[in-house]
Amino acid sequence: MRKLSILLFSCLSWMIFTGTAAIADEIQASMSAPAPEAGISATVEEPHYLDVEDAFIPSLEQNERDISITFRIAEDYYLYLEKFKITPVNCEITDISFPEGIYHEDEYMGPSHVFYKEVTVNLKVQSTAPFPKINVQYQGCTEGMCYPPVVKKIAIDRLTENADSDADSPAGTSGTGKDVKDSAETDGDVDRIPGADFTSLVDVNNDSSSIYRLVGGNILFGLFAFFCFGVLLSLTPCMFPMYPIWSSIILGRKQKSMKTTAVYTVVYIFGMAIAYMLAGFGIAYAGAQFQMFMQQPAVLIAMSVIFLILAVSMFGLFEMTLPTAWINKLQQINDRQQGGTVTGVFLMGVISAIIASPCTTAPLAGALMFIMKDGNILRGGAYLFIMGLGMGVPLAIIAVLGQKFLPKSGMWMKNIKVICGFIMLTIPLYLLRAYLTPSIITAISILMSGSILCYITLLVLKNRRTLFAMTTMIITAVIAVASLFITTDAKNSDIFEPVENLTQLEDLIKDNRIVIVDIRADWCASCRKYEETTFADKNVVAYMSPFKNVYVDITDPDAETGEIVSRYKKEITGAPTILIFRDHRLISSVNGYLPADAFIKKISRALEK
């Protein structure tokens, strides 16, 4: 019982750490903001951001059916792979291909892939009608600022009547290179910031952006986590009792030396791990191809529901497994393999990895979905290979040290399964973190931590301390609900009032001498940082109290909010943006985040002009 308590306490500590990671990030962001001390404002300047046309410059090259669209990307700027959208007009295109991109993750966008310096999109034209065009939608960011999606309408040349057999026709366009802006200007409406169309405006958390660019998504931690995950899977009730049986099958009927036993065991484990690795390659490849689809809110919600169902299955309410006919067929193939030979042992390892037991189906499916969302092929294969090695740890112990060194089967194995279920409950919170407010994340994290604490209390103390467990659960629920209201009240104390449409904003500008407009979005990291630091600073609140302060939420812009963005298109290059009006006209704007003292100084300078 003492060992069980230590194990469960370690798992609880890990869960609390991961479950509240989002809260820690928010606190760190708040603490990292410079305090409004004298002298700091003199060194803090408003960052300069390029216009979107200068940050991302596209060009076109067409060789009959083959088209290449290349984007030159400014230094320290990047484009999202998942935000590209290619739409043909009066033509038919196929074989659209992108480079894999660099793995990138931030708190609100989640796992994604980005391009630095340059990216080329290749495609083929199958047929054309009069006036063919290709609409290319893309979105890019830099530290502290993200641009709204931009649509380029690119005119292309019509195909010759017989492009396949007459590539030298005078009507051909072999090797023709075009500047996209010039070619599109003949069609009018070259660049536009959509109103109702730009539903994916994103701001990148610059701290996490730098970290993930440096470490590439922390692959070492990922490998360690998947190895531990494999060990946990090996300790589930359906897997653990099978290891002594598998050990006898692997070695065959004849007695083997210690060296031969070790070799056969390693071969079996590697066969199992390689099978998982191939599955990881395939799933990650699918994730790289369908990353844009996987980033949609509806898909994330569906994935979260699936993870919830998988987690519930880990609590024993129902079981998930492959069809019985499939398992029986694979088992027959496995039984025909000859134990005691290297080839037979390797094949048994591969087949054993395919036969998923009821205990491993749910967590293994969860791991595959995680890898599919990641989309990195090499990392996906490495993760599942390491997981397979972790699942082979008990088998290695049996082969080298004997069964007496393994703990006996018992209730503790079901407890391991339940703990895996608790771990899986954190995945929906991770997937939907971009759409949850800090108050909801805080409440869910506290409820999950309290639930684990109650489970451990009942497990260790059994029925002797039921009253204590119930009291702990009630206190946890009260704290979670209280945190929800406390953080909501803090957000409601915002010094800005909402504006819904352009007419309302224009009326406020006419009726007030000074109007400050905050352009924000729920998933904008710098916007939240503004709310939690600069706009919460008592000096800023006091300074701005005489003004009319309003905000425009463009999280999910409709036609009305789109009119505001279109009206001030030159100033609103992304989120966050502050518009400063005096005497019924726009006099200045602020792009990106500024700490409290620099913000006051910027507003003061604008109003003194």
Image (cartoon, rainbow, N blue to C red):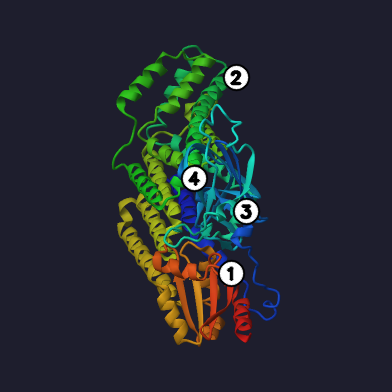
CB under 8 Å between discs 1 and 3? no
Residue occupied by mark 2? 259
Amino acid type, callout 2: Lys
Front disc: 4 or 2? 4
Disc 1 residue crowd, few under 14, some 14–19, many 20+, Cα 10 Å: many
Quick check: can you spot residue 67? yes
Q: Secondary structure at mark 4?
A: strand
Amino acid type, callout 4: Pro
Could you tell me residue 586's position as x and y percent? 55, 79
Mark 4 vs 1, N-terminal side: 4
Disc 2 residue crowd, few under 14, some 14–19, many 20+, Cα 10 Å: few
Residue occupied by mark 1? 591
Residue occupied by mark 3? 57
Q: Secondary structure at mark 2?
A: helix
Front disc: 1 or 3? 3
Front disc: 3 or 4? 4
Identify the residue shown where x is 29% and y is 43%. 317
Residue occupied by mark 4? 132
Front disc: 1 or 2? 1
* Mark 3 → mark 4, Cα distance in angstroms: 21 Å
* Mark 4 → mark 1, Cα distance in angstroms: 37 Å
Identify the residue shown where x is 50% and y is 34%. 280
Q: Is residue 45 above or below residue 460?
A: below
Mark 4 vs 2, N-terminal side: 4
Front disc: 4 or 1? 4
Mark 3 vs 4, N-terminal side: 3
Mark 2 vs 3, N-terminal side: 3
